[in-house]
Image (cartoon, coloured by chain):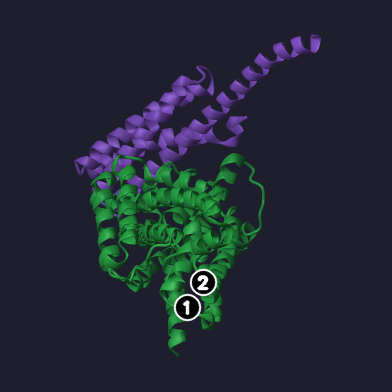
Chain colours: A purple, B green
Amino acid sequence: MPRQRMLTRLIPIIVLLLAACSQSDSTQQDVRSLSSSAATVETTLSAYLERSIPQKFTKRALQESKNEQETLLSDLEGSTQQGSGTAARDIARSLIEATSRAQTAVARSDRKGARQALEELKDPAQALRALASPAAGQ
Amino acid sequence: MKKIFEISLAIVTSIGGFLEIGSLSTAVQAGVGFGFQLTWAIVLGTICVIFLVEMAGRFAAVSHHTIPDAIRERFGFNFFVIAFVTVAIVNFLVLSAEIGGVSLALQFATGVSYQWWAIPVAFAAWLLLWKGTFGLIEKGVSLLGLITLCFVVAAILLGPSWKEVGAGAIPTLPDHDRAHYWFLCVSILGASISPYLFFFYSSGAIEDKWDKSYLWPNRIIAALGMSFGGTIAVGALIVAAMVFRPRGIEELNALYPVALILTPQFAFWGFVLVTASIGIACFGAALELALEQAYLVAQGFGWNWGEDLPPASDPGFNLVHTAAVFLSALPIAAGLDPFKLTNFSMALTAAS
């Protein structure tokens, strides 16, 4: 009986611990995905500015990236409200804004605007890389 | 002399027909996520497929039976049904992913969403299956598939450390994302050891009227064709690792970044080459899969079959490839993401 009672008490603790672990893992995973998405947008915009890819492809690629970033942001908003999670959410918002500006510039064939958006992307991309590094995850 | 020409042509078509949406997507994801570390999975998959293809060809040349034929005759209809249902489901999903691959390539080229391309792609595939001969499908499309060699050229031009690439051919444990690593490993094996590949090969041997004199050519075709084909997949992995990882891209959640993979080497032509590679390779694989689905049903149920026969003499066979190609286009036309479908179907292929 005492063993059963102990198990009954331990199970919720184990479940909570597992949930906490998976939450912190999923936050870190979201940050890594956002970091990769930021790098993909940078690469796409650079290729567009070098005239290596067509405008229509770039426009659609940026739209897909923006959708992915919005999904990741809503995942982050659903997870922990503290620490690196809050920082990641703020950076994700500025990344989405920069991606959106880049998309508008590409849609208007405004190469100057696209170059400016690429510059604006650098800060959030760098911040996400720092957050996504294994050291930040520990 | 004729046989040497046939062997050379068969090797070339095996190389051109090796890469498809599954092998390309898994190789690129492996390169992006783990650098050269998963090279061993491609090498292992290629070795396995060499043996399986050689056995399938040898079996067909000696017994004049295809694999589904033999399964039904040797183990009985009840056992055959289990294998039939499993392979038919996997074929359906992979065919859907291949149609998605062609549709995505058309989206890259035109900007029009892939969903709109699914039915026209299915129609083009059906028309070629209906009007074309086995030789045209096997050799014509696979020869065009040689365009995928651009990944090998790009890998050489990038000048990787061959010592590191060689080290990747030896299995090692990852230092991060273990679950993702093993999932990719299973998917790479699934993409390499697709049942449709050696089922199709054995049906092709019957279509090409192979006999015992083809035993040696069969060995050479299986060994060289598949090895060079595997080299293209390794090329894609190397390019992904060397182009994407230094730019901070360490995971892939969609297929469109793959279109950027050759732009550092070939600028706009890099985009054109990747788009054409995906389109042609997936179209070739879609034709083979639709035919394989028809071979499987016709051979399993003892119907008349043969791509070179007029449709009136094997109506069941033609009905199955027609239904297969149009039904498989429906999930893509409905908006199912080809990239996610590919990942899922490759893992399922490995399980089957």
Q: Do the residues labelled 1 and 2 touch (CB within 8 Å)?
A: yes
Look at the numbered disc 2 and give the secondary structure of its residue.
helix
Q: Dividing the image into 4 quarters, which one contains the N terminus of chain A?
A: top right
- How crowded pointer 1 is (Cα within 10 Å; few <14, some 14-19, many 20+) is rated as some
- For label 1, the residue is B210
Of residues B71 and B142, the one drawn nearer to the viewer in this rendering: B71
Q: Can residue B32 be seen in this snapshot?
A: no
**What kind of residue is marked 2?**
Ala
The x and y percentages for residue B313 are: 30, 67
The x and y percentages for residue B298 are: 40, 60
Residue at mark 2: chain? B
Residue at mark 1: chain? B
**What kind of residue is marked 1?**
Trp
Q: Can residue B95 be seen in this snapshot?
A: yes
The x and y percentages for residue B179 are: 59, 40
Instruction: Name the mark on residue B60.
Output: 2
Q: Residue at coordinates 32% horizontally, 65% vertically from top-left? A: B314
Of residues A114 and A73, the one drawn nearer to the viewer in this rendering: A73
Look at the numbered disc 1 and give the secondary structure of its residue.
loop
Q: Is residue A63 above or below residue A14?
A: below
The x and y percentages for residue B226 are: 52, 68
Number of residue marks = 2
Q: Which residue lies furthest to the right in this view?
A: A2
Q: Residue at coordinates 63% horizontally, 45% vertically from top-left? A: B174
In whole angstroms, how far apart are the C-alphas of marks 1 and 2?
A: 7 Å
